[in-house]
Image (cartoon, helix red, strand yellow):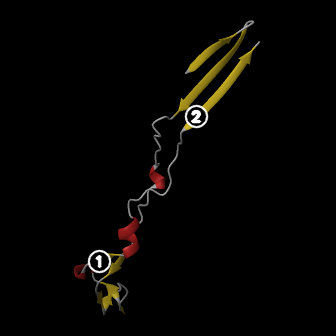
Amino acid sequence: MSKHFTLPRDQGIQLRVGVFNVFNGAFARVDDINLRLTAQCRGFVNGVPNGVGGTVDEVCDPAAGLAFTDATKRTFGTIEALHGHRVVELALKYSF
């Protein structure tokens, strides 16, 4: 937008305003969204065959269930960074 004001003796002042991203359309890219899931095992099993003739203890039992950590519940899906910003330019022009 601009407005021109005429002054005596062929002089003038022009005021200009330029606005970019006026509605502040900040956006997040996919890699700026927290998609990290951390789960804790609710139950463990001992004596699980390891496939080479032995056994392994303290193996997570999926039948007992998994629980998400408190940090995961609090931050999963949150936006960590936004891009884009509002820009306003003002200009004053004096002509003589």
Mark 2 residue crowding within 10 angstroms, few (<14) / some (14–19) / many (20+): few
Residue at 50% x, 35% y is 21
Q: Is residue 77 above or below residue 27?
A: below
Of 76 and 16, the residue lying toward us: 16
Residue at 77% x, 12% y is 96
The x, y position of residue 19, in whole percent, is: 54, 31
Q: Is residue 11 above or below residue 15?
A: above
Q: Is residue 55 visible?
A: yes
Mark 1 residue crowding within 10 angstroms, few (<14) / some (14–19) / many (20+): some
Q: Which residue is mark 1?
A: 66
Q: Which residue is situated farthest in the front direction here? A: 8
Of 95 and 43, the residue lying toward us: 95
Q: Which residue is mark 2?
A: 88
Residue at 63% x, 22% y is 15
The x, y position of residue 88, in whole percent, is: 58, 34
Q: Amino acid at mark 2?
A: Val
Q: Amino acid at mark 1?
A: Leu
Residue at 53% x, 39% y is 86
Q: Is residue 37 visible?
A: no
Q: Which quadrant would residue 33 be assigned to in this image?
A: bottom left
Q: Which quadrant would residue 72 be assigned to in this image?
A: bottom left
Report the Cα–Cα distance between label 1 and label 2: 51 Å
Q: Quick one: SS at disc 2?
A: strand
The x, y position of residue 81, in whole percent, is: 50, 54
Instruction: Assess whether mark 2 and mark 1 are in contact (beta carbons under 8 angstroms).
Output: no
Mark toward the start of the polypeptide (1 vs 2): 1
Q: Quadrant of the N terminus?
A: top right
Mark nearest the camera among 1 and 2 is 2
Q: Quick one: SS at disc 1?
A: strand
